[in-house]
Every structure is written in structure tokens, then in C-alpha cells.
Amino acid sequence: MQLAIEQFRLGLARVRDLIAIHNSLKSQTTSALDVSDILRAALVLTVSALDIMFTKWLL
């Protein structure tokens, strides 16, 4: 159980990093560059972190 929670926290740290990258790029570029895919990747990584945690927790 502890390993599952630790992996979840590591996944969330990566999500926070992706969001920080998005915010930085968005403030430094014009609207011609669409950086929304970075947020989409963060959402997918969040779901993945939850999936890993629950899978390890249930098994």
C-alpha cells in the first residue's frame, strides 16, 4: 500500500511540473502557439497515477 501511495505522489509531482511548464510557456508566447496539449498530457498522467494506485491497492 505504501508503495502505491508513493508512486501516486510521484505521478502528481510530474503533473504539477507539466502544469508549471504550461503556465510558463503560455505567459511567454503568443496565442499562435497552442500549449493546451500540455494540459491534456497532465490530465492523462493524473488518470494514470490514479490507475496505478488503485490497481496496486486492490491487488
Image (cartoon, rainbow, N blue to C red):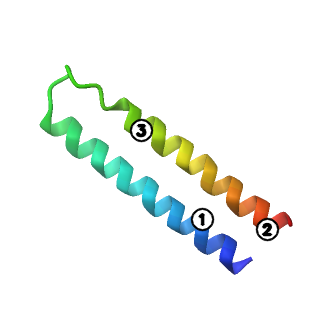
Dot 2, how many residues are within 10 Å of its Cα: few (below 14), some (14-19), or many (20+)? few
Instruction: Give the secondary structure at mark 3.
Output: helix
Name the residue located 70 percent from the left edge and 63 percent from the top edge: 53
Whether residues under marks 1 and 2 lie with C-beta atoms below 8 angstroms apart, the answer is no
- Amino acid at circle 3: Leu
Name the residue located 17 percent from the left edge and 38 percent from the top edge: 27
Give the residue at mark 3: 39
Position above or below: 34 against 18: above
**Residue 51's x, y, as percent?**
70, 53
Whether residues under marks 1 and 3 lie with C-beta atoms below 8 angstroms apart, the answer is no
Side of 38 where 3 appears, left or right: right
Quarter of the view holding residue 44 = top right
Q: Which mark is residue 57?
A: 2
Between 27 and 21, the one lying in front of the other is: 21
Give the residue at mark 1: 8
Q: Earlier in the sequence, mark 1 or mark 2?
A: 1
Name the residue located 28 percent from the left edge and 48 percent from the top edge: 21
Instruction: Give the secondary structure at mark 1.
Output: helix
Side of 28 where 22 appears, left or right: right
Q: Earlier in the sequence, mark 2 or mark 3?
A: 3
Of the 4 image quadrants, the one containing the N terminus is: bottom right
Side of 7 where 16 appears, left or right: left
Quarter of the view holding residue 17 = bottom left
Q: CA distance from mark 1 to mark 2?
A: 11 Å
- Amino acid at circle 1: Phe
Specify the farthest residue to the top.
32
Side of 5 where 1 appears, left or right: right
Q: Which mark is residue 44?
A: none
Quarter of the view holding residue 34 = top left
Position above or below: 45 against 25: below
